[in-house]
Amino acid sequence: ELEQRGPDAHLRMVLRSPNSERTPEDLELIYEDLCMQKALAHLPNSVKRELASVVVFEAHPKLGHTLFRQGDEGKAWYLILHGAVTVETYSKGVVETLYEGEDFGGLALIHNVPRSATITVKEDNTHLLRVDKDSYNKIVRDIETNTVKLKEIGNDVLVLEKSPRLHKYMIIAGTPQKILEHLLEHRLSNTNVAGSRNDPCLDDFLLTHIVFMPTRTLVSELNKYYHMENPAQDREYTINCKRKVVQFVYRWVVTIRHPVFDDVVSMSFLEELASDVEADCQLLGGKSQALQEEASLMHHIMSRLRRYQDERLETSGLKWKLPPGGQPICLFTAMNSTSKNSSRSIIRPMDDIIFRVYCADHTFCTLRLPVNATAEAIKVGAYEKCSLRHPVSDLRIVEVKSNGERVPFRDSEHSIPTTVALNSCIFLTPKDHMDALTCVPEQEKSEGAEISGDFESLSTKELAYHMTLFDWELFWNVHEYELIYLTFGRHRFQQITANLDIFLRRFNEIQYWVITEICMSQNISKRTNILKKMIKLATYCKEYYNFNAFFAILMGLSDVAVSRLSTTWDKLPSKSRKQFTEYETLIDPSRNHRAYRITVGKLPSPMIPFMPLLIKDMKFTHDGNKTHVDGLVNFEKMHMLAQTMRTLRYCRIRHLVLDPPVSKNEADVKSYVSCLRCINNERTLMSMSQKLEPRRT
Ligand code: CMP
């Protein structure tokens, strides 16, 4: 009966013969048999023909034989013809049984890494087909099944898919633990840290793990892996696990930077790991100097951490100020811009922010609270200072926009001062009085701060230069994580997006400043002049690769309040007109901003990207893809999110260095750029525009 299920006696004999002795008839016989194997059904027949000359038959009459162990070098790929084998890992014991028609052992070959599991024959009379590594790489590797599913106790735990371009499996889905385990085992180079730099899966994981695996879980898994026991007492294996963890942590710190140091959980993990590695280096190192390189990596990380902590101490008293109308932006950054210390002007959750809270009668109090304070905290703070007769539970924090729109906050919402819109004010009001709130005069006036200098008299090139430096600083402070926080909701992570908020607000500021400048010019020739100068400004911004400002200016110029001023446009020199038309195609949103994407795709770093588009990409990815599918993390979604986050990183690979233009009045230009006046009430702007050029009837 057994004979019937396995290959017949003749075939077995043929399969056992050395490959070089196989006759054409033998090969034909093997080929026909391979054609009937379910596990090979996906392979083209031409490949089966090639396989016929290289497969070796392996029979295991008794159960219990171990084919190879976790950590061994990978030498062959196997296919089960009959019987079963168990898959066992050091961390979990037996995780799965594989049966007839299933294959195993390809992972180690394709990634050129040690075996990720121990394989033991589970049934008597187990028959296998074996293809050695060289033949596998020559024949099977490129066409072998595109999807690999690893199971544990019958459930999928990791789904991989071959990337033809990279000769690697990409992670498609998996449980957080298995994904991490796979990364540690397959995606870190054995020999050096640099080797793993280019693995996109590792980078994807580092950038997005907070979505599906909180840092607390991550570090506890890393800890387990670092201290992994292996029953075979294999010293090499033990050392290897420790190396992997250190290398992983090193990449983590390099990729994510300060948020790793800001989080108490990861910080104390780092401290502990550093001392463990130190101890293990002494204990296990000996003559072989094992873990030496890892110890020095940990030193490197720890000195980075210390430097960061010192820096934080220096700036611990940092406070930010929200001007009455939410403007100008410069108050958020200008304080330390001369400092060489790049992390100084980053807004952090525990920094204080000073801002006003208004009451319905436009009296106000000034509060100083941490940036991440909740609406509840603001409510209580303001309640103590203002004399309202209502019980605090009846009160609400409301944003009143410059167009009069009112947006109430839930008590649990946080980082309100930085998230309110340009020219918005924060109000404290009894719930049922909300509809009676009106704007305070500051919101409607055109300036938040006194204006120094006049747009027309300043050099356009100098303006573009200083605007770009200003924007660069804001852009530099935005962390990739903020894109995730914004997309998935800040509250989910208890984190702030203040740096991103401020940068986006700057976009609006520039956009409305353009409209305001034009609508405030009474005289037609002055207005034409300003229009021309704005187009010129856009040109310079584009030359500096400041696409954020470029888009803001162009969108300002395309606003109806400006575009309807046909007399002004008619007087524009044809050169400017032509340039504007050309720019309009660049900002054209059709086909998902194709024109812009193609243009920037070809440009080198550094540049300042059109930020709202990155936000849109994140949101689309998020809305269009589930985070979990069938209980597994949808890693393809993580990959897409990480792609967008990498754009940010790419733009800043190099620090911006521009040749300063010949300066006539640098101080004036700088202060002008940081305090742009702007009205952002569409209705006000429209009526100003109508007064300038009443529609002819
Ligand atoms: P490789 O790492 O080369 O050697 C062990 C093999 O076991 C591995 O390739 C996979 O083909 C197979 N395998 C099946 N299920 C699992 C699992 N849950 N974890 C690890 N390996 C598995």
Image (cartoon, rainbow, N blue to C red):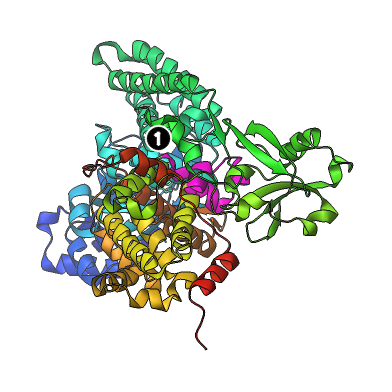
| Viewer-side residue, 53 vs 591 | 591
Q: Which residues are magenta?
A: 477-502
Foreground: 367 or 524?
A: 524
Q: Is residue 419 magenta?
A: no
Task: Tell me what residue is drawn at x 55 percent, y 39 percent.
Answer: 214
Left or right relative to 603: residue 95 = right
User: Residue 95: x and y, percent?
Assistant: 50, 43
> Is 44 drawn above or below residue 111 in the view shown?
below
Instruction: Identify the residue at horizontal 34%, vertical 56% (top origin).
Output: 547
User: Is 479 covered by the magenta stretch?
Assistant: yes
Decide: is 314 above or below 57.
above
Q: Which one is in front, 508 or 614?
A: 508
**In-image side of 185 versus 495 (left or right):** left
Q: Is residue 649 visible?
A: no
Left/right placement of residue 481 relative to residue 437 reads: left
Rate crowding at label 1 as few (under 14), some (14 to 19) or many (20 or more) other CA atoms within 10 Å.
some
Q: Does dot 1 land on a helix, a strand or a loop?
A: helix
Tell me which amino acid carries mark 1: Trp
Point out residue 616 in the picture as x, y percentages from the top left corner. 47, 60
Read off the residue under disc 1.
252
The N terminus sits in image quarter: bottom left
- Residue most extreme to the bottom: 697
- Please state the horizontal and vertical placement of residue 644, each as a whole percent of the image: 40, 54
